[in-house]
Image: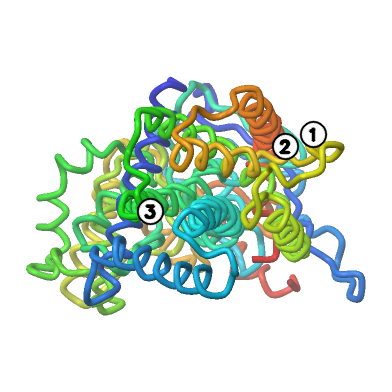
Amino acid sequence: MPDPAMTPLITLDNVGLCYRPQRTIFSRTKKEIWALRGLNLQIYEGEKLGIIGRNGCGKSTLMRVLAGIYGIDEGKMLFSRPNVHVELLSLGVGFEGNLTGEENAILNGMLMGKSRGHMLERIDKIREFSGLGDFFDYPVYTYSSGMNLRLGFSVAMETDPDVLLIDEVLGVGDEVFAAKSEAAIKEKFSSNRTVVLISHDAETIKRMCGRAIWLEKGQILAEGDPGEVAEKYHTGAHQYKI
Amino acid sequence: MWVSTLKRYAGIVFYRTLAGIKSEGRQNYLGYLWFLLEPMLSTLVLYIAFSQITGKGGPEYVVFLILGMITWQWFESSCMLGATAIKAKYGVLTQFNLPKYIFPIVSIMVNTWKFLCVFVVILVTAAVFGYTPNFHYVYLPGLMLLQLLLIIGVTLPLTIGATLMNDLLTVVSSIFRLLFFMSGIFFDASLVPENLKSLFYANPMAVFIESYRAVVIHNQPPQMSHLAEAGLVSMAFLALGMILHAYYDKKILKLTNA
């Protein structure tokens, strides 16, 4: 449990976010879908926070709010200091098929908030870690989906955000790379970096996180020790419908 | 801090543009050669069409038409590509915290690169027909920059509008079609009736097309008063675009059905 005297790095105060799907004059879908509503959450510097919840509970929306991709419609989100770099771990999103692994690695790193220089300095490490060999110089369209993940993961490991948001990806790729990538993620967890991990698997949260919350319908139902939260989630999750 | 952030965005635009050009170059067997071959082909097609079909013929009319066509095409295809860029990159934009104007501007810049290649081919063609490079070519970079400003200005609000409401694209392509016939691509501005001249020149594209022709064909400087007006219209669009992007940047992905 975090020390109550500690100031949180990120504070969400009564946060609400709603989607307003487009309608046509002939069909009427729901006007507003509140993915988060009345959410209060503190994220402390260096903590490993697990977020557990069923599909559609608002986990991914919350991640995008934290990453600054979605603006909130209600409440406040405060950072304890300016320029906190929050990054969502995403694998292979935004790759250009006709460009080589190396070119994509640099471009992808730039999308994640790093300069070209930062990526160029680390390109050899990325090549090494990805284990793609000669394929690193081939266009990405020649890659298998597993190789795509390898490249994406290797890039993400070199972007060093202040807060790393992970959505269900721990070990990726084949057996060899899965072990390697899980080890790399664990290293991120053991460093003093702030990590937020989303999962619908309570075991992962228990194993990796120091604190956990159970999210349901955009609100927190339980908060605290991962073991206890996971227990509540196991016994209580069935009574809720999407 | 915002300076370094802006620098990073400029870097993304620059290297994404390079990547887009490379990516297009690698799609075909002839690769980068197509950046010159394609404009040569389309110039040839336009030449054949216009020199034979229109009774006027003659090298002047061909160069006159081609200049109008490519200038217009740069404008229209950039705006239309840029308009759909947010939707096209929806998957990327929901993963990375990026301003939404980045990908529209990248589409514009890739298209601008192609325009520059075309323009070189056109200048060579013009020279072959006897319109050799002249001193007034110094106006060309400025003209292109001003037109680029217009293209970005029109695209920024358009991309927000088209992302919020797909229907807008259909309406806008009709408006573009109308402007296509009203920008003096097929006729000279001197044919416009006196009482309609101010309306004709209110369209920045008409001004730009006339300006390129003045420089390349007539060896004259462009009409500065008209260009100033076109610049003002571009700035107005740009301002509208910036306001819309500031307002919708964090909202638009929640409001679209991409």
Q: Tell me where residue B13 appears, x and y as whole percent.
A: 40, 43
Q: Is residue A146 above or below residue A3?
A: below
Q: Is residue A3 above or below residue A17?
A: above
Disc 2: which residue: B201
Q: Who is closer to the viewer here, B14 or B228?
A: B228
Parent chain of label 2: B
Mark 2–mark 1 distance (CA, rounded to whole Å): 5 Å
Could you tell me which secondary element the residue under label 1 belongs to? helix
> Taking the image as drawn, is residue A227 in sight?
no
Could you tell me which secondary element the residue under label 3 belongs to? helix
Which residue is painted at 65% across and 32% down in the image? B230
Could you tell me which secondary element the residue under label 2 belongs to? helix
Tell me whether marks 2 and 1 sit on the same chain.
yes
Q: Quadrant of the C terminus of chain A?
A: bottom right
| CB contact under 8 Å: marks 2 and 1 | yes
What's under tag 3, amino acid-wise?
Answer: Ile
Q: Tell me where residue A26 appears, x and y as whole percent.
A: 91, 75
* Mark 3: few/some/many CA within 10 Å (<14, 14-19, 20+): many
Disc 3: which residue: B122
* Mark 1: few/some/many CA within 10 Å (<14, 14-19, 20+): few
Q: In this figure, which colouring scheme has been used for the structure?
A: rainbow
Mark 1–mark 3 distance (CA, rounded to whole Å): 29 Å
What's under tag 1, amino acid-wise?
Answer: Ser
Q: Who is closer to the viewer here, A140 or A20?
A: A140
What's under tag 2, amino acid-wise?
Answer: Tyr
Disc 1: which residue: B198
> Taking the image as drawn, is residue B253 in sight?
yes
Which numbered disc, 1 or 3, marks the residue that appears first in the sequence? 3
Which residue is painted at 16% across and 69% down in the image? A138
Residue B88 numbered tag: none
